[in-house]
Each structure stands twice: as C-alpha cells, then as structure tokens.
Amino acid sequence: MALYAKHKSKRPPMDEMVKVMRLAGYPETLIERSIKWNEKMDERSDDIQKELNLLFAKWPAASKAAPKVRKVVPKKIKAVKKKM
C-alpha cells in the first residue's frame, strides 16, 4: 500500500513493484506474468488512447456533465367565496 500511496496519480515503476512483490513472497511465475502484462499495456497505451479519443469524439456528451433540469411548480389556485 505504501508503494501506491507514494505514486498517487500514476502506476508505480515496474522495478519497484517487482521488489515489493518479491518481499511480499509472490511466486516468480506471477511476477513474470505481471511484468509481461505491464510491458504489453505500455506498448498498447497509445493505441488505447486513440480509441478512447475516437469514442468520445463521436459522443461528446458522454464526457460532459448532464444539464440540470428545473422543475416547474404550478401556481396554487385559491378558492374564492362569492357573496350573494
């Protein structure tokens, strides 16, 4: 947890993550899979960002906040007593 707290807005560097995984007792096969996955994600990050940009270019409202809808309150009708 301290490693992720240190790098709040980004993923921690892979070499630091590997050190922490080894200290925590993770098996080497899991560490190797994690390294391969991170390398694959680093390679694809530009392509993924391009796809996201295309998606939000088609539907820009998805990235904007929804407008607030005001409720229209009808006026109250007052009863009037007529004198006869």
Image (cartoon, grey):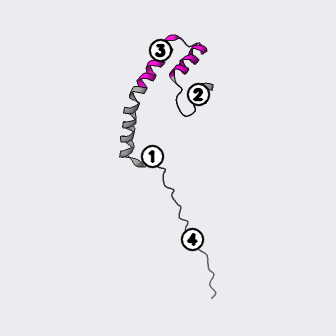
| 20 within the magenta span | yes
| 21 within the magenta span | yes
Q: Which structural element holds mark 3?
A: helix
- Along the horizontal axis of the image, is 19 left or right of 39? right
> Identity of the amino acid at label 1?
Ser
Q: Which structural element holds mark 2?
A: helix
Which residue does the numbered mark 1 point to in the structure image?
Answer: 63
- Along the horizontal axis of the image, is 70 left or right of 49? right
> Identity of the amino acid at label 3?
Glu
User: As rendered, which of 8 and 69 lies closer to the eye?
Assistant: 8
Which residue does the numbered mark 4 point to in the structure image?
Answer: 75
> Identity of the amino acid at label 4?
Lys
The CA span between labels 3 and 4 is 70 Å
Question: Quick check: can you spot residue 55?
Answer: yes
Which residue does the numbered mark 3 point to in the structure image?
Answer: 32
> Which numbered dot is residue 37?
none
The CA span between labels 2 and 3 is 20 Å
- Along the horizontal axis of the image, is 51 left or right of 32? left
The CA span between labels 3 and 1 is 36 Å
The CA span between labels 2 and 4 is 56 Å
Question: Quick check: can you spot residue 1?
Answer: no
